[in-house]
Image: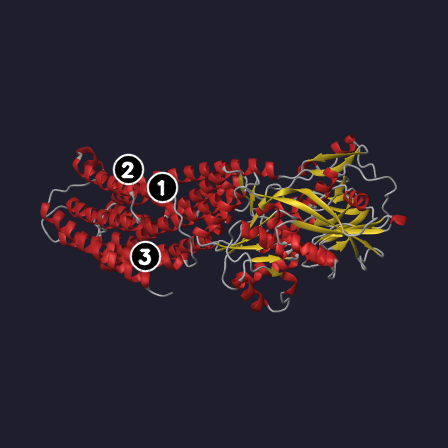
Amino acid sequence: MHGLTSAQAAGAKANQVPRRSSRSLSAIVRANVFTLFNLVIGVLWALVLIFGEWQDSLFGLVIVANVLIGIVQELRAKRTLDKLAVINEAPVRVRRDGEERQVQPHQVVLGDLVLLGPGDRLLVDGEMVESDGLEVDESLLTGEADPVHKLPGDQVLSGSFAVAGAGAFVATRVGTDAYAVKLAEEASRFHLAHSELREGVANFIKYITWLVVPIGALLIYSQLKHSADFGTAITGAVAGIVTMIPEGLVLMTSIAFAVGVIRLGRHNCLVQELPAIEGLARVDVLCLDKTGTLTAGGMDLDQVLPLRDGQPVEDALAALAHLDSRPNATAEAVRARYPAPADGWTAGTTVPFSSARKWSGADFGERGAWVLGAPDVLLDGGDGYDRAAELAATGTRVLALCRVNALPAGEGAEPVALVTFKQRLRPDARETLRYFARQGVTVKVISGDNPVAVSAIAADLDIPDAHRSVDARTLPDDDPDKLGELLDSHTVFGRVSPQQKRAFVGALQARGHTVAMTGDGVNDVLALKDADLGIAMGAGSPATKAVAQVVLLDDRFATLPHVVGEGRRVLANIERVSNLFLTKTFYAIVLSLCVGVAGVMFPFAPRHSTLTNALTIGVPALFLALAPTLERSKPGFVRRVLRFAVPAGVLCAAAVLVSFWAAHSGTSTLVEDQTSAVITLFLTTWWVLVLIARPLNWWRIALVGAMAAAFAIGLTIPFVRQFFALEPGDIGDDLTAVGISIVAAVMTSVAVKVAGTLRT
C-alpha cells in the first residue's frame, strides 16, 4: 500500500500512448505527398517536360505548392492541438515512496499504485487493492448501464471511470497494452468522427478517378491519332487530364480544417477530433447541463434551516462533508463553513454520493445514521418537502439532512434540516443564450437538480418556456417516440439521471436533430459520448474531458459562439470552393469527351488552364475558404454541389468548344484560336466565381474584380502574352468569344437557379 519507490518507478515501463488529437509528422507528410492525384499529375508533368515546352509544365509547380501549404498548415494545427492537449491532460494521483503525488498520464508506470475518486478516468488496467464504496462505470466499454461496485481483487479496465466512492489499484497493463488503447488502435489510431463533408469529398475524388482513366485514355488516343506533332498531341492530352483533376479541393479542405483548429485554439478551445468542426456547423439543438455550464462550478453555503429541535444539525452536516477525500462542490461549500468535523463523529458504513442516487450518507454509530441529498428523493411529502419546494422555486439549491434507520438502504428518512446553497450564474450565460436564439439553435436545459429550481434559473436567463419544467422521473422509459415529442415541446428538464441524458440525446437524434451536449460532471459522460458533438468544460472531470470532442479549456461558456461560428465558416466555405473545383472538373470532362469522340485538337494548352485556374479558382479559393459566415449548414452537401457544378461545368465546356470551333473555321492561326477559347473559358468560369462568391460585399467584389483586372492586364503585357502563348489579334473572333461568354453566363445563372430549386 506504500506504492513503488522512486527508483522502481524510474525503471518501470511507462504509459506511453499516441495522442488522440493529432497525427505524427510522417503521417502528415505521407497524407499530403503520396496521393493518387499527385502520382497522376507527376507523370503528366514529366511527359510535358520531356515532349513539350517548359511553360506548359507550370501545373506541376502548383502541386508542389499545394503539398507544401498543406503540410505547413497541418503542422501548425498539430502544434496548436498538442499544446492544448497537454494543458487538458488531468494529472493522475499515485502513491510513491508512501506519499501521494500527482503525475502526468505518460509518467504512470507498470506497478504504480493509482488512487481513484469520483470523476477520475482510468488510463491503465489494474487490480483493485483498496475500495471505500468505489463504483466504476464501464458502460463505454461494455454497454452495461449500471455502475459496478469494485472490491479488492477485482480487475479494472482503462476507459472506465469512477462515479462514486474512492479506492486504489495496482497498474498491471500500461501504454499500448492497456485495454482501451488496444480498442482505439483497432478502430484507428487517429480517430475521426463521422463527417459528411470528408466522405463527400472522398466520394468526389473516387468517382472522378474512375472517369479520368478512361476519358484520359480516349483523349490521349485521339490527340495522337489526329495530330502530326507528337509533342503537341501530348500537350493537348495533358491539358485535358490535368484540368479534370480537382487537385486543390483536398488541399482547401485541409487548410480550412487546420485554420479552424488554430483559430479555436486562440480561444483556448481544444478540438480533439478535427471533423468536430463540421459538427459545429450542423448543430440545431444544444443540450446544456445547468451546473457548471449555466452556473459557475462552485457554490456557497447559504442557510441551515432546522426542522426539528434538539438535533445536532451542524455536527452531522460537518461530519458528512468531511467523509470524502475528494469532495464535490456541495461538500466543499459545507467545509468552507465547517472546516473540521466535531469530535466523536467517526463513520462506520458509508454510502458515497452518486448522480443516480442523489444522496450520500454514513452511519456514525451511537450518533445514528445520517444522509444528505435531494429533498424530493429522500422525503415523501410533509412540511419539509413543501418548504424545500418553495425554496427551490426561487432558484436556490436545496438539500435535506435526514436521519435514517440504517444504511445503505437509506429508508425511513426523518427530515432534520434543510440546507440551501447559493449558485453563481455565469456572467456570460445570458448573452451566449441570446446568440444561440438568434442563430436558430434550440436550447434544452437538462439537469439532475430539482426541476423547479432549474426552471427558476432558466427563467432568470430568459430561456423560452422556462416555466414549463418537466420532472424526468415522470417520463416514459420504453417509448422513444413519446419521449421525443416531450423533448420537442419542452425546454427545461430536472431530476434527469445519467442514463436519461443519454436517452434524451438519442431521442432528439431520432427526430432528425443534430445534437450538441455540454457538461462538466461525470453524470454527463454517457450523453457527451453519444451526442453528435460533445463539449466539455475545462474545469470538468477527467472522464468528461476524455470523451468530449471539444474542450473549453478556459471554462468560459461565452466561447461557444466562437466554436459554432468557426464550424459554420469552415463548412460553408468548403462547399463554396467545392463548387469551384468541381465546375472545373466537369467542364474538363465534357471537353475531353467531345474532343476525344470528335477527334479534334484540344482547345487550349496546359499553360492556358494554369492561368485561368489560378485566377478563377486557386487564388479566390484561398480567400473564400477562410471567409466568415453565420449560415448554419444543412445535410445534402454532395447533392447541392452537384446541382451547381454539373450544369455550370457543361455550359462552360459548351461555350469554349463553340468559341474554339467558330474561330478555327476562319483564317486565324492556332494560337489565335486558342486565345479565343481561353477568353471564353476565363469569362465563363469568372462568372461562376461571381455566382459562388454571393452574397457580394466589398471584399468579394474587390476579389472578383481583381481577378478580371489581372486577366485583362495579362492580355495587354507583351511578355505575359508571349509566356502564356496568347495572341488576341483577331478582333472578330475575340468579340465572338465575349458574346458567347455572355450568353453562357446568362444560361449558367438560370440553370443553377433551376437546379437549386429541384427537390432531392
**Up-down relation of residue 18 to residue 515 (above or below):** above
Give whichever of discs 2 and 3 has the lower sequence position: 2
Q: Residues within 10 Å of mark 1 (few under 14, many from 20)?
A: some
Front: mark 2 or 1: 1
Please give the residue where the numbered disc 2 appears in the rendered image: 54
Q: Distance between the residues labelled 2 and 3?
A: 35 Å
Give whichever of discs 3 and 1 has the lower sequence position: 1
Q: Which of 36 and 189 is in front in this view?
A: 189
Query: Mark 1: which secondary structure?
Result: helix
Q: How far apart are marks 3 and 1 (CA)?
A: 20 Å
Q: How crowded is mark 3: few (under 14 residues within 10 Å), some or many (20 or more)?
A: many
Q: Which residue type carries mark 3? A: Phe
Place residue 621 in its image quadrant: top left
Q: Is residue 449 visible?
A: no
Q: Which residue type carries mark 2? A: Trp
Left or right: where does residue 609 sit relative to residue 108? left
Q: Residue at x 37, y 43 (%)?
A: 627
Q: Nearer the viewer, residue 475 or 86?
A: 475
Q: Say the numbered circle drawn on residue 622.
A: 1
Marks 3 and 2: in contact by CB < 8 Å? no
Marks 1 and 3: in contact by CB < 8 Å? no
Q: Nearer the viewer, residue 640 or 389?
A: 389
The residue positioned farthest toward the top in the image shown: 7
Place residue 754 in its image quadrant: bottom left
Q: Which residue type carries mark 1? A: Leu
Query: Mark 3: which secondary structure?
Result: helix
Please give the residue where the numbered disc 3 appears in the rendered image: 644
Residue 756: where, in percent of width, then height?
32, 60
Q: Residue at x 58, y 50 (%)?
A: 457
